[in-house]
Image (cartoon, helix red, strand yellow):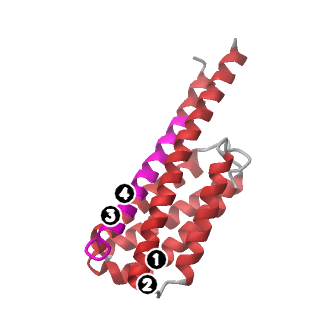
């Protein structure tokens, strides 16, 4: 296997795994939130803070190490990653006041993060082989972000249910993106192999 082919396969695998992991974490957090809406406030805040930190580090890594993306896409990924990491740290610092923190501080960061995540995802349309799922993810992420920002002071149970459903849907879409990106990686690998021979 040639060195460029191995590098491309490795990059696709890393992106696929990071999308899958962040999707699974989001899905688990959403399910826990829907099953135990009140009792799980501290646990969900911890799980979600973990998701934010991991996703933030992944986005920062993608922005720094992805030489195939343009300058604005790289800057967007780094800024989104920093925003996710900051939101995760704030959530971890306030686990005992999880409901209040989630309602007044973390929810604002989550809404802004989802909004930026959707916008940054749209910058990948030219380079991403899973175009339809990227658009679906971006639209859902933007809608979820706007809803959370507009309804920060809404009743707690409505917010918990909406966050739970949003996490489940966004997690499932991320997992689907990971699988479709895997198919794209195989197609690129086969194309590169046929060009090499």
Q: Which mark is residue 107?
A: 1
Check whether the beta carbons of the residues at disc 2 and disc 1 lie within 8 A of each other: yes
Q: Is residue 68 above or below residue 105?
A: above
Q: Alpha-carbon distance for marks 2 and 4?
A: 23 Å
* Magenta span main SS: helix
Marks 4/1: CA distance?
18 Å
Q: Position of residue 106 (x, y in %)?
A: 43, 76
Residue numbers of the magenta segment? 11-40
Q: Which residue corresponds to mark 2?
A: 104
Label 3 and label 1: CA atoms lie apart by: 17 Å
| Marks 3 and 2, the one that precedes in the sequence | 3
**Mark 3 or 2, which is nearer the eye?**
3
Rendered residue at 55%/67% (across/down):
114
| Residue 102 within the magenta-colored segment of the rendering | no
The image position of residue 39, as x and y in percent, is: 25, 74
Circles 2 and 4: CB atoms closer than 8 Å: no
Mark 4 highlights which residue?
28
Q: Nearer the viewer, residue 76 or 96?
A: 96
Ranked by sequence position, the earlier of labels 3 and 1 is 3
Query: Which residue matches tag 3?
Result: 32
The quarter of the picture where the N terminus appears is: top right
Q: Residue 13 magenta-drawn?
A: yes
- Tag 4's secondary structure? helix
Badge count:
4
Asked whether residue 151 appears in the rendered view, the answer is yes
């Amino acid at each position: 296997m040639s060195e460029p082919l191995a590098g491309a396969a490795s990059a696709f695998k890393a992106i696929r795994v990071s999308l899958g992991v962040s999707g699974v974490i989001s899905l688990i957090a959403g399910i826990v939130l829907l099953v135990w809406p009140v009792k799980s406030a501290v646990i969900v805040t911890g799980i979600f803070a973990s998701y934010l930190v991991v996703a933030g580090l992944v986005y920062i890594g993608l922005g720094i190490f992805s030489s195939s993306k343009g300058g604005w896409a790289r800057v967007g990924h780094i800024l989104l990653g920093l925003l996710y990491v900051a939101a995760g740290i704030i959530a971890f610092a306030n686990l005992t006041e999880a409901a209040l923190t989630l309602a007044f501080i973390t929810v604002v960061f989550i809404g802004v993060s989802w909004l930026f995540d959707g916008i940054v995802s749209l910058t990948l349309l030219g380079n991403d082989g899973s175009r339809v799922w990227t658009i679906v993810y971006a639209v859902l992420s933007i809608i979820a972000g706007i809803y959370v920002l507009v309804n920060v002071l809404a009743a707690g149970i409505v917010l918990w249910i909406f966050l739970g459903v949003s996490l489940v849907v966004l997690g499932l879409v991320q997992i689907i993106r990971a699988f479709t990106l895997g198919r794209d990686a195989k197609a690129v690998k086969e194309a590169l192999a046929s060009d090499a021979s």
